Amino acid sequence: MKCLLSISFLIVSFISAYSQVFIPKWETCLGGTEWDEGTGIIYADGAYWIVGNTESTDGDISYNHGAWDIWLLNIDEEGNLISEKTFGGSNADGGFVDIKKLNDTVFYIVARTKSNDGDISDNPWPGPEGNYWVLQINNHGDIIWEKVLGGSGLEKIRNIAICNDGGIITLGISTSDDGDITEHFGDYDLWMIKLNSFGVKQWDLSLGGIGYESGGSVKQTEDNGFIVVGTTHGEGGGNYDTTCNFHGTPGGGFVDGWIIKLDSSRNIEWQQCYGGSFSDGLSNVLEVEDGYVVIGHTMSNDGDVSGLNGPPGPNSEYGGDIWVFKIDKTGTLIWQNCLGGSYNDYGRNIFTTSDGGFMVVGATGSDDGDVEGYHGIDVGIYEDVWLAKLDSLGNLTYQYCYGGGGREMIQRGVVQKSDFNYVITLGTDTDPWQCGGQMWPDLRVVELFDSTVGIAVTATNSSTIEIYPNPTNSVLKIKLPQNFSFSNAGLELLSINGKTLLRKKLNSVFIELNVSKLNSGLYVIKVQNNRYLITQKFIIK
């Protein structure tokens, strides 16, 4: 009995720590001969809507207004292009581009514009600085309304959130003290502006001191207030509280993460700085039942930060880690974790999972530390998309790298279909993945899923297979159902990273595999015929 309990515990431990085997379900490349990338994605009424940037005038791009345009694409659930359209004017439009869904037929797009022609009906401040540009469109790609927001200085949009009333709130940075900006406190302020569903401005709010602040993300909270995450240089003035526990020298060369909780009337309930001696910035936030979970980037290994992979501090060769932490509803730090390796690692997205944990989707340029399976041809220079699964206490339970030899450039373009299924859009300059040309990136979309979850096409009680002994260190025996059809039947043995180690045609319900030369760890057996796709995990001890 003790032996059986030990084996069962070993199997559970391996499965909970390493059980996911992400593989592409489908992949598609779209673009022209210039720079094209995907930055945002939603799912609506059985299809995906993608936004990004394009500089092309050929390939899959039907029209370009001049310089950079926003590119909107509609693809089906297998990656086939249904339609595409560009938005912009004769100058550069786009930059950070995102899309949010009001419902299945009405969407919001946010970007930056420097134009005052084409699709831009009125921009009082065209020119080199740029302003927020907000569009409401329908599911045919028609503009319902569009609006330029900002002032005569520089505005860069960083995030958009749908509000409970169907309007939107946008967050970014601003240097203006005129136009739509009611107050301006210093060099760069965080600037929020609320529009109703008809595009009418309802209010705006600047957050900051006399120095530099930068935006990451804003969410409306369950109490109808807002939570804002970003960065600050920690200088006084404005509505920045100098008792914010800034780490380092205020106004010095490094920034802290900054979180501001607002009530429903936009009064500051509390604010707090998070970080260490070097630069720490925050990019996204989730509200959970007992607090908030935040992702960002850190170069520190002191103060609030511990466990940094690689040396702390600014360094041309090393870039810092993804930093994930949880706070309670009053801002008190509960737990934190650094994720990544010795080089550049960035968190872009975070999702809750059904086990009470979280999935972080971002980018990595590392091939050590927490990262396994990096694909880049030059570590620290080229980035993979990186999925990192955390438990409810922030501990890393498994990870997966998706990439080729070049750069895979991801922003917030991720749809979570389930704990084990994600659709991601990005930009890629990996040569074999490009479709428009070899000079500049193309837009890429991929559906990644765990091949060990979900299975039979026509599931019945007979669609199971027996694998024994499990664990094993020599011969693995496999027994298929007696009524198993051998029409186009085959078996694959996969590593935990999804690499195929063995393929075998099947002609018997009894199979024996010699696995004695494989390393210890978790593996996957996949059996498929015309009717079934069946998978089972097993352990080599």
Image (cartoon, rainbow, N blue to C red):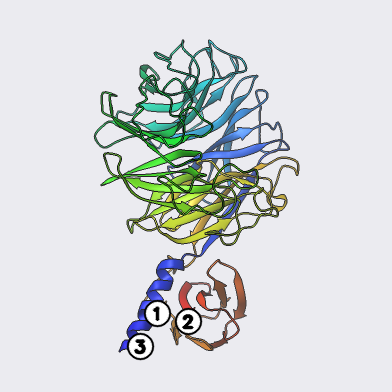
Image marks 1 and 3: residues in contact by CB distance under 8 Å: no
Which residue, as the protein is rendered here, is positioned at the far right? 438
Q: Position of residue 420 (x, y in %)?
A: 44, 58
Residue where numbered disc 3 is placed: 3
Image marks 1 and 2: residues in contact by CB distance under 8 Å: yes
Which residue does the image show at 54% across and 19% down from the upper left? 154
Q: Position of residue 336 (x, y in %)?
A: 39, 50
**Element assignment for label 2:** loop
Task: State whether residue 93 is above or below residue 354.
Answer: above
Residue where numbered disc 2 is placed: 484
Query: Closer to the camera, 417 or 272?
Result: 272
Query: Closer to the camera, 240 or 24?
Result: 240
Q: Which mark is residue 462?
A: 1
Q: Quadrant of the N terminus?
A: bottom left
Image marks 3 and 2: residues in contact by CB distance under 8 Å: no
Front label number (1 vs 3): 3
Looking at marks 1 and 2 on the same chain, the residue that comes earlier in the sequence is marked by 1
Amino acid type, label 2: Phe
Whether residue 513 can be seen here: yes
Looking at marks 1 and 3 on the same chain, the residue that comes earlier in the sequence is marked by 3
Mark 1 Cα-neighbour bin, 10 Å: few <14, some 14–19, many ≥20 = few
Q: CA distance from mark 1 to mark 2?
A: 8 Å
Amino acid type, label 1: Ser
Whether residue 457 can be seen here: no
Which residue does the image show at 53% across and 12% down from the upper left? 152
Q: CA distance from mark 3 to mark 2?
A: 33 Å
Amino acid type, label 3: Cys
**Element assignment for label 3:** helix
